[in-house]
């Protein structure tokens, strides 16, 4: 039970990060039906920028929280600029091109951003300075009880605040209504006096800002960063967005959290599920490894990365519109 | 000076000209209709006026300035509103939100609120359903919403593209009643219609469009009596 609870806590933390990144994919998709594959790289750049600031300030004597916040407040504007420039330079000229062109461009933008990051931050795996003292809060009385760390609490709280803020922005403000109107019918939105290009830029910029914070969270949570980290993270968050129903904000949140839980529980239990030692009873000597270790399993937790793709494939086969995806008929 | 003047306007889709050089004027306070058969170029003309398609030739003068190079939202912000063919309501926004979009370019909150009450007065049905999404409205109600939304921008010139299309006769009556009410408030109107009789009976002047060219124009009453109009558009 403790393992289960622990994996749920880990999964929720991870899921919040996926959800925040997935929101970036789903917002852009909702407004211009483009899968912005470069969004994972925006998250990576956010992570790297924060890393540089944190390293520079690590010896400054400032409180660790302040240093992380300063790192975040550098990462956010950098990513906003990157998001704006990507849309302006790479996607806007292709607004009316066949769908394949912007999709391939998005992959190209990913590669360009990765290599820019490589030039700035080198090809090495970067260790985040562990300036925040990890504190564990046990959820039981024994030393083996499940625990939640201060970093996990911070990740979850920050994510919830951002998700709530985004929902308020989209549903309660004038620019949010304009975003939804633009996604439903950009030509008519223009007739209402909405500068559609500005609304699209705004969407990219907001998505990138969320991505920047997600990048900082990933860096502080895992303690490492790499110029290619955006690829897998992006693909998982994208799968989460598809799981929830791409284009749907609540769907991205739900999909992200489910994806985190699936991955954490999968990683925690995949060994048990694929333990083959019981076969020894039927086929003596089936696995010599079982003498060495009764824990022998076909797959270990290093297979955690496959879950996102299993989920993606299952969703695409059985429910392409995702869990909360709108029926196609609802689109005008 | 006319509020709107088209001078030798041409519009082409991929090299094929749909509007082949038309001259048309709408004076301030007038109600002018544009009638013609399917494919005559009526919608295309309105699209060019509102910037949805570029003009291939000629000029669009609005309030004395050439607006043919402006972007759609810039034209809208000058007070030129269009209720497009097929209504173009935002189906997943509520009725309230659709109306808020109509007032998007306006900042005076209290005046916007007053106008909201005014259009609810014109269309009580919308007020009852103001928190429902526009996609749940009937075709006639969507037409009402599209007109109410356009009024929320306080337009100086309101262009309507076939507002009676697909509506039951009683709804058509209601739509024209509202059009007359809007005109009576001093809004200048450019009305595109297939229902030529009703359009001409409601308008001051009219233009007949055929194959992208203006073939007849004049006082609405005179057009109603013109044998060519009677034969081709009034089914006599
Ligand atoms: N997007 C487009 N691409 C190519 N041709 C078009 C396009 N829109 C309209 N046309 C053509 O331009 C011509 C004029 O069309 P338009 O829609 O302006 O006619 P209309 O007078 O509004 O007709 P209706 O009464 O059927 O609405 C038609 O021949 C039509 O086929
Ligand atoms: Mg038409």
Image (cartoon, coloured by chain):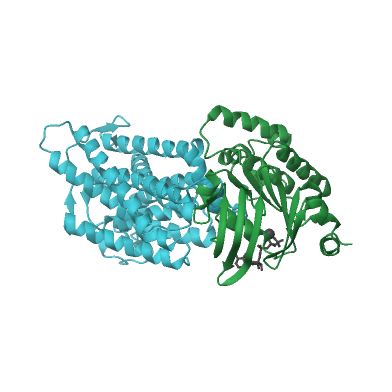
Chain colours: A cyan, B green
Q: Which residue is located at x 49 percent, y 53 percent? A: B70
Q: Nearer the viewer, residue A171 or B80?
A: B80
Residue B139 pos. (x, y %) = 72, 49
Q: Is residue B181 above or below residue A83?
A: above
- The quarter of the image holding the C terminus of chain B is bottom right
Residue A14 pos. (x, y %) = 34, 45
Q: Which residue is located at x 29 percent, y 63 percent? A: A111
Q: Nearer the viewer, residue A271 or A207?
A: A207
Residue A156: in sight, yes or no?
A: yes
Q: Is residue B170 left or right of residue B88?
A: right
Q: Tag count in the figure?
A: 0
Residue A218 pos. (x, y %) = 28, 46
As drawn, the residue found furthest toward the right would be: B236
Q: Nearer the viewer, residue A85 or B231?
A: B231
Query: Which quadrant of the view contains residue A94?
Result: bottom left
Q: Nearer the viewer, residue A200 or B84?
A: B84
Q: Which residue is located at x 70 percent, y 45 percent? A: B30
Q: Is residue B72 above or below residue A57?
A: below
Residue A323: in sight, yes or no?
A: no
Q: Is residue A186 left or right of residue A297?
A: right
As drawn, the residue found furthest toward the bottom would be: B15
Residue A81 pos. (x, y %) = 30, 49
As drawn, the residue found furthest toward the left would be: A59
Looking at the rendering, the quadrant in which ligand 2 lies is: bottom right
Q: Is residue A158 above or below residue B195?
A: above
Query: Which quadrant of the view contains residue B178?
Result: top right
As drawn, the residue found furthest toward the top would be: B110
């Amino acid at each position: 039970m403790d393992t289960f609870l622990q994996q749920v806590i880990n999964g929720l933390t991870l899921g919040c990060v996926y959800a925040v990144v997935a929101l970036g994919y789903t917002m852009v998709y909702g407004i211009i039906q483009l899968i912005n594959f470069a969004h994972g790289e925006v998250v990576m750049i956010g992570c790297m920028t924060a890393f540089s600031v944190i390293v520079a300030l690590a010896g400054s004597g400032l409180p660790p929280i302040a240093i992380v916040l300063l790192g975040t407040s550098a990462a956010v504007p950098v990513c906003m600029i990157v998001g704006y420039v990507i849309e302006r330079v790479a996607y806007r000229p292709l607004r009316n091109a066949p769908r394949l062109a912007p999709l391939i461009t998005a992959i190209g933008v990913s590669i360009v951003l990765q290599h820019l990051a490589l030039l700035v931050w080198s090809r090495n795996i970067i260790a985040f300075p562990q300036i925040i003292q990890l504190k564990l809060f046990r959820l039981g009385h024994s030393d083996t009880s499940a625990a939640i760390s201060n970093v996990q609490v911070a990740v979850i709280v920050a994510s919830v605040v951002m998700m709530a803020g985004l929902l308020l922005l989209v549903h309660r403000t004038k620019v949010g209504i304009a975003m939804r109107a633009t996604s439903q019918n950009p030509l008519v939105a223009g007739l209402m006096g909405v500068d559609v290009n500005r609304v699209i830029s705004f969407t990219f910029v907001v998505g990138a800002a969320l991505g920047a914070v997600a990048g900082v969270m990933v860096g502080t949570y895992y303690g490492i960063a790499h110029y290619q980290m955006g690829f897998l993270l992006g693909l998982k968050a994208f799968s989460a967005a598809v799981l929830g129903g791409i284009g749907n904000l609540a769907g991205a949140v739900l999909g992200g959290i489910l994806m985190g839980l699936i991955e954490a529980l999968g990683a925690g239990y995949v060994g048990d599920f694929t333990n083959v030692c019981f076969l020894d009873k039927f086929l003596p000597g089936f696995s010599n490894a079982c003498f060495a270790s009764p824990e022998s399993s076909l797959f270990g937790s290093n297979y955690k990365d496959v879950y996102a793709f299993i989920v993606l494939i299952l969703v695409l086969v059985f429910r392409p519109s995702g869990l909360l995806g709108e029926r196609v008929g609802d689109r005008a | 000076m006319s509020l709107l003047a088209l001078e030798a306007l041409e519009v082409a889709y991929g090299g094929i000209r749909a509007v082949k050089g038309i001259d048309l004027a709408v004076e301030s306070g007038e109600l002018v209709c544009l009638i013609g058969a399917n494919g005559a170029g009526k919608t295309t003309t309105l699209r060019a006026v509102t910037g949805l398609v570029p003009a291939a030739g000629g000029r669009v003068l609005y309030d004395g300035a050439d607006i043919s190079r402006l972007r759609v939202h810039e034209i809208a912000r000058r007070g030129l509103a269009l209720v497009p063919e097929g209504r173009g309501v935002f189906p997943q926004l509520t009725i309230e939100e659709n109306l808020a979009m109509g007032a998007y370019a306006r900042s005076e909150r209290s005046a916007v609120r007053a106008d909201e009450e005014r259009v609810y007065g014109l269309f009580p049905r919308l007020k009852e359903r103001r928190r429902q999404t526009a996609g749940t409205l009937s075709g006639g109600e969507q037409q009402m919403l599209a007109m109410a939304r356009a009024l929320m921008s306080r337009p100086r010139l309101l262009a309507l593209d076939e507002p009676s299309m697909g509506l039951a006769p009683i709804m058509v009556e209601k739509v024209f009643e509202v059009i007359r009410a809007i005109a009576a408030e001093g809004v200048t109107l450019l009305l595109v219609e297939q229902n030529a009789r009703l359009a001409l009976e409601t308008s001051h002047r009219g233009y007949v469009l055929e194959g992208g060219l203006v073939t007849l124009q004049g006082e609405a009453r005179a057009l109603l009596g013109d044998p060519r109009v009677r034969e081709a558009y009034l089914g006599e």
